Image (spheres, grey):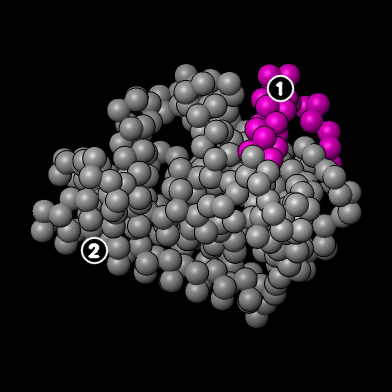
Amino acid sequence: MRTDLNYLPAAKLRELDRVVEMIFQGFREATQNATGRRQKAARILKIILFGSYARGDWVDAPLDANQYKSDYDILIIVNQAELADRADYWEETEQRLVDAYLYEKVIRTPANFIVHSLHEVNDALSHGRLIFREIVKDGIALYQSDDRELATFNPKTPEDVYLAAKDYFEEYMGHSQSFYRGFQHAVGDGDLKKAAFDLHQATEPLYQCVMLVLTLYTPFDHNINFLRSLAEGLDHSLFNVWPRGTRAERAMYQKLKDAYRKARYSKHYEISREELDWLGGRVEDLGRKVHDICTRRLEDLQKAIPA
């Protein structure tokens, strides 16, 4: 796997060093009280940069009206499957990276990561998960304690890719539409907290749908900031769904993200009918764009099936 990062500006190299440092710090804290033999042997095997910063086609446009900025996309490979559990081991690191970017300004580029065991990564490669092919092809190792090569990518047949993508499209669009109807009913009933939760749940499968149809992979995560970043990296047209040029616009999306937990469990969570109307309109636009992206992809995949 490639290790050369010399094409990146010095400021980006320093940022990536800081990101890797925060990943290790969070991992040490999450595993420091381990008692079992396996947990005491917990290790990070590889940290791999993938996506636009690995390919060299990243965008950083802070003066653009919508402030488009590519994220660092990172794969962390651990030596045990249970260490990939985001809730148990990685939530603090995820929040630390968000804080470092949004509030502390220690890094100037958002950073997102996925975590899998070595077995899971090799299994995904052997079963033709396209995003892992791209990681192997374009990825750059930021850290390796295990220099073994990853498994060889075993492509699915064009028909298998089409059928899998079609199934994902139908399933996840269906999930989103069902929750969106729940959102509309809750708004009509005046149950605004439930409406906010349902709207979050309508958003989540839309981003997962894009990733599954385009790459046959999605992380199963409720953090729609994280899912949005990965999906926008696959198709930049999705970026314009959510205005983010002002603090108020960014706060609106954060309110939708917070709805997954706070709308159900916090008595302090508040959202207005006007805010829900605005957010609902954006999710409708997201649904239309996702439908178009996935439909075009399915058409291309169907055409690639040998007659």
Horizontal placement of 110 versus 142: left or right?
left
Closest to the observer, 191 or 247: 191
Q: Quadrant of residue 49?
A: top right
Residue 1 highlighted magenta (yes or no):
no
Question: Which residues make up the magenta segment?
Answer: 2-28
Q: Main secondary structure of the magenta part?
A: helix
Furthest toward the front, the residue is 35
Q: Earlier in the sequence, mark 2 or mark 1?
A: 1
* Residue holding disc 2: 181
Is residue 139 something one can see in this rendering?
Answer: no
Residue drawn at x 67%, y 77% is 306
Q: Quadrant of residue 124?
A: bottom right
Horizontal placement of 178 versus 89: left or right?
left
Task: List x then y, in percent, for residue 13.
Answer: 73, 25
Horizontal placement of 10 versus 103: left or right?
right
Residue drawn at x 30%, y 36% is 252
- Looking at the rendered image, the quarter that the C terminus falls into is bottom right
Residue drawn at x 83%, y 43% is 144
Quote the CA–CA distance across marks 2 and 1: 46 Å
**Amino acid type of the residue tagged 2 in the rendering:** Arg
Name above or below for residue 177 compared with residue 4: below
Closest to the observer, 164 or 114: 114
Image disc number at residue 243: none
**Amino acid type of the residue tagged 1 in the rendering:** Arg
Residue 19 highlighted magenta (yes or no):
yes
* Residue holding disc 1: 14
